[in-house]
Image (cartoon, rainbow, N blue to C red):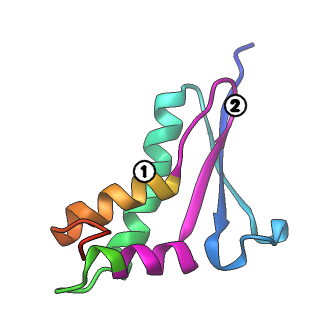
Amino acid sequence: MAELYTVYVDDNFQYMDEDARTKHGEYATLEQAVQACKAIVDACLTSAHEPGMSARKLYEEYVAAGDDPFIVGPGASFSAWTYARQRCEALCGGNIEGS
């Protein structure tokens, strides 16, 4: 039986509270799990994004209170914060340092 990749979601606002953690789902491949994590971050950023918002402001809001998905499984590696940083820069048209 192949091992599954499980996606869990922490809330950055309650990062120390494991009781606030939710199980998002199980996936047959790492690629599927990564895509699920990206979709969670994208949805969070899209809902927080406002016209004219800087990349820095959007990223600060994300790390303060956004959904922080992660993967448990063999060889799993995904950083929601790194992905969110890239997406904030793409959504807002600037970089985090220069915003």
Residue 10: quadrant of the picture: bottom right
Of the two numbered discs 1 and 2 on the same chain, state the one appearing first in sequence: 1
State the residue in front, 10 or 27.
Answer: 10
Magenta region: which residues? 57-79
Find numbered disc 2 in the image and state the secondary structure of the residue it sits on. Answer: loop
Residue carrying label 2? 73
Give the residue displayed 64% in from the left and 24% down from the top. 75
Task: Quarter of the image for the C terminus: give it.
Answer: bottom left
- Horizontal side of 30 relative to 46 (left or right) equals right
Give the residue displayed 41% in from the left and 60% down from the top. 84
Give the residue displayed 31% in from the left and 59% down from the top. 87
Give the residue displayed 71% in from the left and 21% down from the top. 3
Q: Is residue 98 above or below residue 86?
A: below
User: Label 2 crowding class (10 Å Cα cut-off): few <14, some 14-19, many 20+?
Assistant: some
Residue 6 % position (x, y): 67, 40
Residue carrying label 1? 38
The type of residue carrying mark 1 is Lys
Find numbered disc 1 in the image and state the secondary structure of the residue it sits on. Answer: helix
